[in-house]
Image (tube, rainbow, N blue to C red):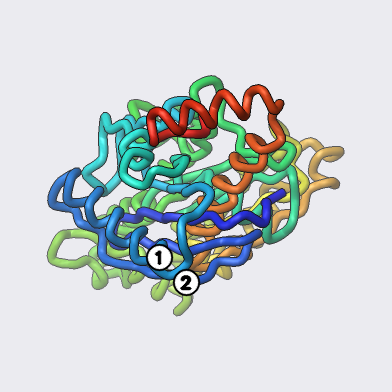
């Protein structure tokens, strides 16, 4: 799937930017710095400095892949909106291509995480859910990221599973999305409501000065066997199972992986989710899917971004010679986006 050309993977998060060099799916010379959040230029300059640090060690890469916590129009590499970073309405691929002089590919971070997972399992047909503050998702079909017509697709967290459910906490007009049940924000909402309703409860004692029970407090209470906390987690697991059954029915993946920060608490809900999905998914499809926790660790973001860049380079290299010559000529005249 991945080529052996040298590429860079860049993972832009709300707190740090990580960059690594890749040949195949192995990340090396990883460097990370704090994400500059004061402005778009500050963020881009910080990203450029971090990438140049790695280039100084490994040399000029064939291409650079970048994962961002954003809605991306992949066909143009433009960022529509972002979560937690100052990046909106930016032609990111063109801007970074101009700065580095090599082809750059920009995608949503959950898509990149899914691509990394597909390498690690390995599997060419995989669905990945990233459970964190929100719910991200990625779908790999035939070894490639599925994105829809313009590259904005596979927002699995915003698939509605209850028409009358709670308001979606994301930047989304809907209610009852998976994200309204299976995100850190949803857990905090439910735990805080329960704490306020039951003033003598364990969760009431966990209410902070902001009037909220944190996800961490909730998990601690559940691990200690608090029935209210376990009730909140039980609903989380059940609704996750509803979502999993839906994704299995639609995509028939070979593998479905659960990742993201909340997967650290998976011992509290994973079995419940699988049990629920097993009773709901179409049996012929359910028999053929393997559901597990994600294998990718802290490097998944950079690996996925790097694999994306490698795939694009490989695809382009195998393109018709006349096409290659034309694009090489274009790259020489513009010095920016050689690979379209
Ligand atoms: Zn939503």
Callout 1: 10 Å neighbours few (<14), some, many (20+)? many
- Percent from the top left, x then y, of residue 97? 38, 39
Q: State whether residue 246 appears in this view.
A: no
- Percent from the top left, x then y, of residue 313? 60, 42
Q: Secondary structure at mark 1?
A: helix
Q: Is residue 253 left or right of residue 259?
A: right
Q: Which residue is mark 2?
A: 29
Location of residue 145 with respect to 295 vertically, above or below: above
Location of residue 328 with respect to 87 vertically, above or below: above
- Percent from the top left, x then y, of residue 141? 70, 37
Q: Label 1 vs label 2: CA separation?
A: 7 Å
In the figure, residue 252 lies in which quadrant? Answer: top right
Callout 2: 10 Å neighbours few (<14), some, many (20+)? some
In the figure, residue 232 lies in which quadrant? Answer: bottom left
Q: Which residue is mark 1?
A: 54
The residue sitting at 30% across, 54% down in the picture is 47
């Amino acid at each position: 799937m991945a080529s052996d050309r040298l590429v860079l993977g860049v993972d832009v998060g709300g707190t740090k930017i990580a960059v690594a060099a890749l040949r195949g799916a192995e990340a090396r010379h990883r460097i990370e710095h704090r994400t500059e959040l004061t402005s778009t230029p500050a963020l881009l300059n910080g990203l450029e400095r971090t990438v140049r640090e790695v280039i100084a060690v490994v040399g000029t890469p064939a291409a650079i892949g970048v994962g961002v916590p954003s809605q991306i129009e992949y066909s143009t590499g433009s960022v529509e909106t972002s979560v937690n970073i100052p990046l909106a309405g930016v032609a990111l691929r063109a801007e970074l291509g101009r700065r580095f002089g090599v082809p750059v590919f920009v995608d949503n971070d959950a898509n990149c995480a899914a691509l990394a997972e597909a390498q690690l399992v390995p599997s060419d047909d995989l669905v990945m859910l990233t459970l964190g503050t929100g719910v991200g998702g990625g779908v790999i079909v035939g070894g490639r990221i599925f994105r829809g017509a313009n590259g904005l697709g596979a927002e699995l967290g915003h698939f509605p599973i209850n028409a009358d459910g709670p308001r979606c906490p994301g930047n989304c007009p809907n209610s009852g999305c998976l994200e309204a049940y299976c995100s850190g924000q949803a857990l905090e909402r439910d735990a805080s409501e329960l704490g306020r309703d039951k003033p003598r409860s364990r969760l009431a004692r966990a209410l902070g000065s902001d009037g909220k029970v944190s996800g961490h407090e909730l998990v601690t209470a559940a691990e200690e066997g608090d029935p209210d906390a376990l009730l909140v987690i039980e609903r989380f697991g059940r609704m996750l199972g509803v979502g999993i059954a839906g994704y299995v029915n639609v995509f028939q993946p070979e593998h479905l992986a659960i990742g993201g920060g909340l997967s650290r608490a998976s011992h509290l809900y994973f079995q419940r989710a699988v049990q629920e999905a097993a009773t709901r998914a179409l049996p012929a499809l359910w028999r053929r899917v393997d559901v597990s926790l994600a294998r990718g660790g802290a490097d998944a973001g950079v690996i996925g971004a790097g694999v994306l860049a490698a795939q694009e380079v490989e695809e382009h290299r195998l393109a018709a010679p006349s096409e290659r010559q034309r694009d090489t000529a274009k790259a020489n005249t513009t010095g920016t986006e050689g690979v379209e």
